[in-house]
Image: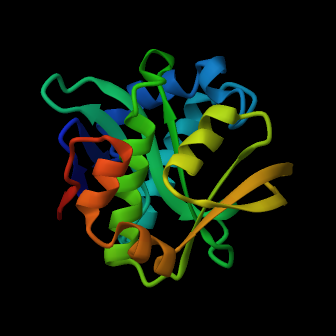
Amino acid sequence: MTLLTTQRLRLEPFNDRHFEELYYLNNDMEVMRYITGRKVSIDETLEHIELVKRNWKELGFSSWSIFLEGTNEFIGSCGVQHIEFNRENPLEIGWRLKLSKWGQGYATEAAQCMMQFVYDNVNVDSLYAICHQENKRSEGVMQRLGMLYNGIEKWYGLETNVYKMTRDRYKSQFMDIGNFYQYMNIPQVCSSLP
C-alpha cells in the first residue's frame, strides 16, 4: 500500500480507521447523487474497505482516503480500479469530496497524483475516468487533467461520459511534471511512500 502526498494533501490507503469518515461521506446525498444515487449502508462501506485492502495486496493499487496536510482533516476519497470492479475492464480513476471542499482544486490535485502513481507503477497504456452525464463538476476535473473525451458508454448500468488519458499523451503533455503544476496553477509535487 502506497501513501501519496502533495503540498496540500495526503492520500492514505483505505484502512479500518477510515470507516466512520467514509461512511458519512457515502451518506451525503449531494456527494452521492451522481455516483450511486443513494446512501451507502454500513455493511456496504465495510465490504468496500475489505475489497480495497484485498486489491492493494493483489494488484498494488486501489483507493485512498484524502486528508488535508497540516490539519489532518478527512476531506474525501479517491481511487484507481477496474471499471465495474471487473479486472477484464480498463482502469479508471475516480474521486468524491465533502461538499464543503468542492471548488478548491482538491479533486484535480488528488487525481493528478493518482495518475502519476499509475503511470509510474502500473503497466497500463490508458487510464479512464467516467461520470454521470449530468456531473459537470467531475467532467470539468477530467478536462483540467488533460483527458480526452472518448464518448458515451454504458458502465455501472448508466450511459456515462468517458474520458481517457493514454500513457503517451500523459508523457508528452506532462513530461516535466512541473509543467503540469504550472499549467494547473497547483503548487505541489506528488510523492509516494511505500
Residue located at (68% from left, 37% from top): 35
**Front-lying residue, 98 or 174:** 174
Say left or right for 158 vs 107. Answer: right
Q: Please give the name of the residue rendered at 39% of the width and 54% of the height, measured from the top-left corner.
A: 112
Who is closer to the viewer here, 181 or 132?
Answer: 181
Q: How many labels does the image show?
A: 0
Q: Position of residue 43 (x, y in %)?
A: 58, 36
Vertical order, 136 against 108 (above or below): above
Decide which of 35, 166 is in the foreground and name it.
Answer: 166
Pick the quarter of the image with the C terminus.
Answer: bottom left
Asked whether residue 47 appears in the rendered view, the answer is no
Which quarter of the figure has residue 30? top right
Q: Is residue 43 rendered to the left or right of residue 114?
A: right
Specify whether residue 3 is in view: yes
**For the N terminus, which image quadrant?**
bottom left
> Percent from the top left, x then y, of residue 153?
83, 60
